[in-house]
């Protein structure tokens, strides 16, 4: 039985009913008097010079109020989370197919659409690069003058001496693994509405915005105004998965520029096709791994060279690839490591944050590699991993000693592999090397993951708890609900800490004018960081209320407990007051019943030259094991069952943790066997969900969620992280299971039918859209 | 999509009048599962849509006579898949209809639409080919009947003239001695357009012995095709797993697939053979019981 009243209980999500009944208000549901509609004209070529842009005919079309271009931007022309290099509207040169050239603002979306066809753009096509290896080759075309060699960033990591390490090794393997470009596939495409304020130069932007503070910074920069002139209100989110960050900032900025120019509200809603063309994706990686081990199965050295396709703009590439460099060896003790990770510019669709953030790629490589190496050594992949796995006090590749939290890697590996029956099944299935019909296999993958931002940047978050005179509570948070269940989790933490009832809390939409800048809702940091801030705020208010209760109950302050809507004397629970009566009394006494909570992450460090340091203040460990069936005649991989064991520190809400596991496993499966955004010379071919295939409910296997709890010293009630780890493990588990089933080692994602059957995909020459002509 | 006329005729005569009035500017809308996508993507620009949902003459699944089943063009995939009459006398079609798209698409999409759209990947069409169904077409000059195999002329091309429409299909009933098989291969379990599909019917004369063998493939040629080479190699000959493997390789001779977003030419060729082999094994094992 849990010692908590609200926390650690599987409470239903507070936004569940409004979402399943369709009552939740999404951005496109908003309407304002006099609202106009913006439609964007996009680049015709991925890399071209704009010789002439003539918008006059479009402007003359009745119903068109304005045509906005770069010339209308009062402030910064370009934005970006790390470097401001992505133009809100391009002026002279397109860098990828999703670039905005101009935007028609009209009375209706239909008029705006018609006007788009009247804009005349004269282009001169420029030479292009779509391949990362070509981009970094000698004499390659330079896409951005400030980035020689098309290198966005380079992260080295040096530990020990790999040359020595390979000399000490009995077996050295070299393997190349590659991963594909994938789409977040959130159900709601990007959308924003900007409403001009009554005061000059102020604007409120509503939107499907993952990170309200990032959007505010970008909108203010583009308008050339101070931050307090821009107010961002987040609407209900139809999914984000890391995807509604800089791309949505650009859309908010376009809407804001148009709203201030026309003096009327302006709404922009992307179609699915626009969304897939414009929005950034998950980075494709080319990963060369060289690994050395002794005959008895101890890892001695690892040399890793990674090229990450950043596409056309910097976006989050430096942060994404930084997580890769920290975690590239996997959760194993390797005394000698040399890693180099490069972000590389091309004219492909740009890549940025996506659930996993630089980990799904490297885990696919390193966990495939661990199985390959075990095979070479004649060892069981499980025993081999356990022999090298991080344990309490292990030292990571960056020299960090893992001694401030419970290192539970072995525990999660054992739980997941036991649940799938790995050891017995692997042996049995390995016997069966049928070349026809259906065969089964099992496989697994394990990971460790740094919690929150780590040495990426400033890491602090705030919350506001405000108890009303009737005992009801407003809860504001600087981190935002993106579908992960944050409203519910934060409300549970606030209720637990205040001692009120869960249903007394109302979670307010995130509004940048109410709450301090808490950074971005990313990196699976909301429960750890935002949850701690909520706890801090609630604790401050509880202390005030306890003071009042102590007076009224005539008992010492420290002998009163607040829980479940009551405040009572520990020794004599019959001496008790309702929470609401205490609130009423406190109000009557003129007490402050609101507080801002704040939480700043513990210190971390990083040496850019050596890649050494305490990268993250704590880590989580996860393992997913899969059983698959491979049809040797068609190459079809059916995932039958997945066991997912994740150490979350403490499950604030076991039901939402399971929800994260179901969702993450399903996304991981799509990455493993189905999904790939097809670009042909920079042109997006898979533009809607008829051709970009994600798993349907029919494809989802039996999923066994296993919650492991080793409370952490930092997070609220010991809670850590769950959002991203669930999404980074299944693809290599499937690849390992496919090998176990049919002896085929596939080193490139996804494991679609052709790749499993033939070992490669023949689909390189793409057909046109539509079911038949191709 | 602004300014499109939608007419909802109450009879086939009214429908024909509307077709004549609008000519090529009008499209018939049944379930709309293909047409609405075409409208949205602006692949076509019709001035009028004629919704035949209220036309009684295109509805129903019934015995046309003692040897034929008649299925109205407006019959949905879900209706056909659950029809006892179809399941008893043309199970291959019921099976194919049950594998179209998703529940939503099966509830909206119709057999008349699947035929008129004339996609080489249409899931009901290989089944109709092996059933040797006939398409009833109605137009200003009256009704004509076209064998399903002569109906298609290429991807999205058929013998339907402007102002004509599909009224229904007539299907010769199969007796209990026939064994049938339908298999589609898609990238996932539902909402997947076929990479390759194969339909079979054959009259079982004893273990491994078949006459009246009919095999059709979808998505391996500009239209659905009958695989005559394969049929001849099985018909009246003793089939066993070894000959089945040999015969399945003949699928190459009947298929001329292309590379598109769902699969490459080379993969499709192999899959035609492998699905055929799977079908032959299924046929063989069913024939053990007859």
Image (cartoon, grey):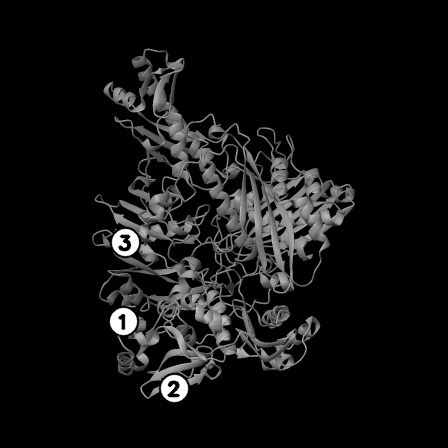
For mark 2, name the chain. B
Q: Decide: few, some or many residues near mark 1? Use Cα within 10 Å; few <14, some 14-19, many ≥20.
A: few
Q: What residue did someone put label 1 on?
A: B4
- How far from the left and from the top, in percent, is residue B88? 48, 70
Could you tell me if the residues under marks 1 and 3 are in contact, i.e. CB atoms within 8 Å?
no
In the picture, measured across the screen, residue B32 lies left or right of residue B189, that is left
Front disc: 1 or 2: 2
Front disc: 1 or 3: 1
**Residue A174 vertical position relative to residue B215 in the rendered view, above or below:** above
Q: Is residue A768 visible in this depiction of the protein?
A: no
For mark 1, name the chain. B
The mark nearer the N terminus, 1 or 2, is 1
Q: Which mark is residue A266?
A: 3
Question: What is the secondary structure assignment of the residue under circle 3?
Answer: strand
Q: Which mark is residue B144?
A: 2
- How far from the left and from the top, in percent, is residue A715? 48, 30
The residue positioned 64% from the left and 47% from the top of the image is A367
Residue B61 picture quarter: bottom left
Q: Decide: few, some or many residues near mark 2? Use Cα within 10 Å; few <14, some 14-19, many ≥20.
A: few
């Amino acid at each position: 039985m849990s010692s908590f009243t609200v926390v650690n209980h599987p409470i239903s999500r507070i936004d569940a009913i409004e979402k399943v009944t369709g009552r939740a208000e999404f951005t496109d549901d908003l309407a304002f008097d006099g609202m106009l509609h913006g439609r964007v004209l996009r680049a015709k070529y991925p890399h071209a010079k704009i010789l002439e842009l003539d918008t006059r005919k479009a402007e003359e079309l009745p119903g068109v109020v304005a045509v906005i271009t770069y010339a209308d931007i009062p402030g910064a022309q370009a934005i970006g989370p790390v470097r401001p290099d992505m133009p809100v509207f391009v002026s002279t040169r397109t860098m990828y197919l999703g670039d905005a050239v101009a935007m028609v603002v009209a009375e209706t979306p239909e008029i705006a659409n018609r006007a788009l066809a009247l804009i005349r753009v004269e282009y001169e096509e420029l030479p292009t690069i779509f391949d990362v290896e070509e981009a970094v080759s000698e004499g390659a075309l330079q896409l951005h003058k400030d980035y020689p060699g098309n290198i966005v960033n380079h992260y080295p990591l040096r530990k020990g001496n790999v040359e020595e390490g390979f000399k000490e090794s009995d077996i050295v393997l070299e393997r190349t693994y590659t991963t594909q470009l994938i789409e977040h596939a959130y159900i709601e495409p990007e959308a924003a509405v900007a409403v001009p304020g009554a005061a000059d130069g102020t604007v409120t932007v509503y939107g499907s915005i993952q990170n309200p503070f990032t959007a505010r910074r970008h909108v203010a920069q583009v308008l050339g105004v101070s931050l307090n002139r821009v107010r961002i209100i987040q609407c209900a989110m139809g999914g984000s998965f890391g995807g509604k960050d800089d791309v949505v900032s650009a859309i908010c900025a376009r809407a804001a520029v148009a709203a201030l120019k026309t003096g009327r509200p302006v709404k922009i809603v992307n179609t699915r096709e626009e969304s897939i063309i414009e929005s950034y994706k998950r980075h494709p990686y080319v990963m060369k791994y060289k690994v050395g081990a002794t005959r008895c199965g101890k890892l001695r050295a690892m040399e890793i060279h990674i090229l990450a396709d950043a596409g056309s703009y910097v976006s989050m590439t430096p942060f994404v690839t930084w997580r890769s460099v920290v975690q590239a060896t996997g959760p194993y003790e390797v005394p000698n490591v040399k890693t180099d990770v490069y972000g590389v510019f091309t004219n492909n669709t740009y890549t940025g944050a996506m659930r996993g953030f630089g980990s799904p790629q490297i885990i696919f490589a390193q966990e495939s590699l661990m199985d390959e190496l075990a095979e070479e050594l004649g060892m069981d992949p499980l025993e081999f991993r356990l022999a090298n796995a991080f344990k309490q006090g292990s030292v990571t590749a960056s020299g960090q000693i893992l001694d401030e939290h419970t290192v539970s890697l072995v525990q999660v590996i054992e739980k997941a592999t036991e649940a799938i029956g790995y050891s017995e099944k692997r042996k049995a299935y390995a016997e069966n090397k049928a070349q026809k019909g259906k065969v089964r296999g099992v496989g697994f993958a394990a990971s460790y993951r740094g919690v929150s931002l780590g040495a990426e940047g400033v890491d602090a978050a705030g919350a506001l708890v405000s108890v009303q005179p009737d005992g009801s509570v407003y809860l504001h948070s600087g981190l935002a609900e993106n579908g992960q269940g944050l409203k519910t989790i934060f409300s549970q933490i606030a209720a637990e800490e205040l001692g009120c009832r869960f249903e007394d809390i109302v979670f307010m939409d995130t509004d940048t004018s109410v709450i301090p800048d808490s950074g971005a809702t990313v990196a699976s940091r909301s429960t750890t960081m935002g949850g701690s801030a909520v706890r801090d705020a609630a604790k401050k208010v509880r202390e005030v209320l306890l003071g009042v209760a102590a007076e009224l109950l005539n008992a010492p302050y420290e002998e009163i407990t607040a829980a479940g809507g009551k405040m009572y004397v520990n020794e004599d629970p019959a001496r008790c007051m309702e929470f609401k009566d205490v609130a009423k009394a406190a109000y009557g006494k003129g007490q402050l019943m609101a507080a801002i909570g704040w939480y700043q992450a513990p210190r971390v460090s990083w040496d850019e030259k050596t890649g050494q340091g305490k990268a993250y203040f704590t880590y989580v460990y996860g393992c997913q094991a899969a059983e698959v069936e491979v049809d040797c005649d068609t190459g079809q991989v059916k995932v039958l069952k997945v066991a997912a064991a994740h150490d979350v520190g403490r499950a604030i809400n076991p039901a939402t943790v399971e929800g994260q596991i179901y969702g993450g496993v399903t996304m991981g499966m799509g990455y493993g066997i189905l999904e790939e955004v097809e670009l042909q010379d920079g042109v997006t071919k898979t533009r809607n969900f008829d051709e970009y295939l994600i798993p349907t409910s029919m494809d989802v296997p039996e999923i066994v969620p296993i919650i492991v709890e080793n409370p952490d010293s930092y997070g609220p009630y010991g809670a850590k992280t769950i959002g991203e780890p669930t999404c980074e493990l299944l693809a290599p588990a499937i690849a390992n299971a496919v090998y176990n089933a049919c002896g085929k080692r596939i080193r490139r994602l996804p494991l679609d039918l052709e790749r499993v059957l033939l070992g490669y995909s023949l689909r390189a020459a793409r057909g046109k859209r539509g079911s038949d002509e191709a | 999509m602004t300014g499109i006329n939608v007419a909802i005729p109450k009879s086939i005569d009214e429908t024909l009048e509307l077709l004549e009035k609008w000519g090529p500017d009008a499209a018939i809308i049944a379930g709309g599962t293909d047409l609405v996508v075409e409208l949205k993507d602006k692949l076509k620009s019709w001035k009028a849509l004629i919704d035949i949902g209220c036309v009684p003459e295109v509805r129903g699944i019934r015995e046309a006579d003692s040897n034929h089943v008649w299925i109205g063009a407006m019959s949905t995939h879900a209706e056909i898949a659950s029809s006892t009459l179809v399941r008893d006398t043309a199970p291959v079609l019921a099976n194919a209809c049950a594998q179209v798209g998703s529940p939503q698409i099966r509830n909206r999409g119709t057999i008349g639409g699947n035929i008129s759209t004339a996609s080489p990947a249409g899931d009901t069409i290989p089944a109709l080919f092996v059933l040797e169904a006939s398409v009833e077409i109605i137009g200003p000059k009256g009704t004509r009947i076209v064998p399903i195999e002569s109906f298609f002329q290429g991807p999205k091309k058929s013998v339907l003239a402007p102002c004509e429409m599909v009224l229904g299909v007539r299907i010769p009933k199969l007796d209990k001695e026939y064994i049938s098989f339908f298999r589609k291969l898609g990238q996932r379990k539902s909402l997947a357009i076929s990479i390759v599909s194969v339909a079979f019917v054959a009259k079982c004369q004893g273990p491994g012995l078949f006459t009246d063998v009919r095999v059709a493939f979808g998505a391996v040629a500009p239209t659905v095709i009958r695989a005559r080479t394969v049929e001849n190699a099985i018909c009246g000959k003793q089939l066993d797993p070894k000959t089945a493997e040999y015969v399945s390789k003949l699928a190459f001779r009947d298929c001329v697939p292309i590379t598109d977003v769902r699969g490459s030419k080379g993969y499709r060729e192999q899959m035609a053979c492998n699905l055929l082999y799977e079908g032959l094994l299924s046929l063989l094992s069913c024939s053990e019981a007859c």
